[in-house]
Image: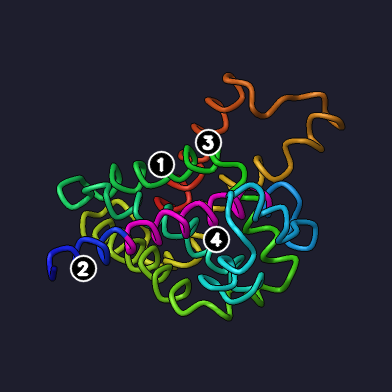
Amino acid sequence: MRKKIELHESRSRGDGKHVRRNIIDAAHALFAEKGYSGAKVEEIVVRARTTKPMIYYYFGSKERLFAAVLEDVYAGMRMIEQSLQLAELPALEAMRKVIEVTFDYHAKNPEWVRLVSIANIHYAKHILTSNTIASKNSAIVDLMKNLLKRGVKEGVFRKSGDPLHVHLLIISLCSYRVSNRHTWRVIFKRDLEAAKEIKLQKRMAVDAVLAYLRE
């Protein structure tokens, strides 16, 4: 009897994780497509194939659901950075790898850029409700700090590099081309998502950051 109860509890936990994941995925898609204000809970319910009470059971409110989506997308980027195994690489090559991976992530996940833009439109008030976003994102600053320190020790980086500003520089070069690709296509008649454009922009991003660090 005890084994049956434990099996039921295990399945319930597994089903709960599955339901929560479906809701986050559905909300992710709709928030990215329609914005926070435009995405309706009813639409998320339909896409997630769940019920409104289940959304409020797991997240409490639409605001907390959006915060959970932001937690999820930020965690995805941080997990990739932490998996790079940079310790054995010279600082210059390690930094190059971080820039390239960051560029690729933004290029392949335009909805990530949209979601962060939406969060900023709302003055990041949803991030204030999260217990994890700020603390988990401090990892990228620590990573930058470590690489810059190693680069100075190896004689390849300037001593005045600020970890947060270097991160800002990298993100700026990787995200602006994604967030503004539609206006650029109309105004300048250039498709920033074309393979040759991506290759050029990626090389420019790497060269620009490394040139700044080596001044």
Residue pointed to by mark 3: 108
Residue pointed to by mark 4: 69
Residue 210 in percent (x, y) is at 42, 46
- In reply to whether residue 15 is colored magenta, the answer given is yes
Residue pointed to by mark 2: 5
Q: Tell me the distance, in whole angstroms, between the alpha carbons under discs 3 and 4.
A: 18 Å
Badge 1 density bin: few <14, some 14–19, many ≥20, Cα 10 Å: some
Q: Tell me the distance, in whole angstroms, between the alpha carbons under discs 1 and 2.
A: 45 Å
Farthest residue to the right: give it. 187
Q: What amino acid is at disc 2?
A: Ile
Proximity of marks 2 and 4: CB atoms separated by less than 8 Å: no
Sequence-wise first label, 4 or 1: 4
Q: Please give the name of the residue rendered at 55% of the width and 41% of the height, measured from the top-left corner.
A: 109
Mark 4 falls on what kind of element?
A: helix
* Left or right position of 128 against 101: right
Sequence-wise first label, 2 or 3: 2
| Of the pair 31 and 149, the residue shown nearer to us | 31
Q: Nearer the viewer, mark 2 or mark 4?
A: 2
206, above or below 137, in the image? above
Residue pointed to by mark 1: 101
Q: What amino acid is at disc 4?
A: Val
Q: Tell me the distance, in whole angstroms, between the alpha carbons under discs 2 and 4.
A: 32 Å
Q: Nearer the viewer, mark 3 or mark 4?
A: 4
The residue segment tinted magenta is: 12-30
